[in-house]
Image: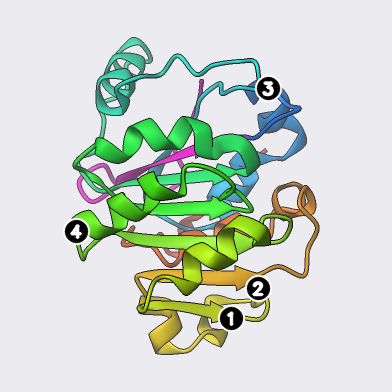
Amino acid sequence: MHVFRPAGYDRRTAGIVVYVHGYYVHVDEAWREHKLARQFASSQRNALFVAPEAPAAAEEKSDWGNLRAKLASSLRRARIEPPHGPVILVGHSAAYRTIVPWLDEPSVHNVILIDALYGNEPEFRAWLDRSPSNQMTLVVKGTAKWADPFVRALPYARTVPEIPGRLGQLSAADRSARVLSLRSQYGHFELITDGKVMPLLLGRTPLPSIKRTRAARAP
């Protein structure tokens, strides 16, 4: 597991972002090759960013189980006091497999799936139905076969034709939508390797921002 605290981090108001990688990569490779620390820093969100090991192939299983308990024990070993703000789940591709068991965690109200909704749709729908405060952001490229019917079934969902360059290019209704689906002009792997999309999407969460002047450039 990798943990990143951005410059300007303030535990009093911070949340936690848990990022889960997809297949064909392990967390150490993802951290280095996808420059995850840089992506987290460029989001300018006041959060503790956590990237755990996840399945890199279909035959592998996640060993995380209870999210809150695992986070607490892992951060305790790292001698990091966890913040008490919202927990944001972000996943790329097959990360949905790891995220689904965490949907029962009461503190999870925001899920971002980056071309990652292609299974367990009933569980994600049940999570949305559980509370009007639950919010989902979907990026759709190769997963349209599964994601499009899911979105069409939700009367409150909104779809935009491409990922904007900045959050302000979205309408107020899009920014506040319970479910926002963004069609991607980027390729499936490019969505995470280029480092443009995740920082943008984290701006749609309730995490407070860190002022640009205090944000550090991550390695």
Q: Nearer the viewer, residue 89 or 43?
A: 89
Badge 3: few (under 14), some or many (20 or more) residues near its Cα, within 10 Å?
some
Q: If the image is split into quadrants, where does the C terminus sit?
A: top right
Asked if the stretch drawn in magenta spans residue 22, the answer is no
**Could you say which disc has been placed on residue 26 in the image?**
3
Task: Please determine whether, in this image, residue 76 is positioned above or below residue 202.
Answer: above
Q: Is residue 57 left or right of residue 147?
A: right
Mark 4 / mark 2, whichever is N-terminal: 4
Q: Which callout, 3 or 2, points at the residue further toward the start of the chain?
A: 3
Q: Is residue 142 left or right of residue 148?
A: right
* 206 shown above or below 172: above
Residue 196: give x, y in percent of width and height.
Answer: 68, 60
Looking at the rendering, the stretch of residues picked out in magenta corresponds to 1-21
Local crowd at mark 4 within 10 Å, few (<14), some, or many (≥20)?
Answer: few
Which residue is identified by label 4?
131
Label 1 is placed on what type of residue? Val
At a point 54% along the width and 78% down the height, the residue shown is 159
- Residue 20 lies in what quarter of the image? top right
Relative to 61, 142 lies left or right? right
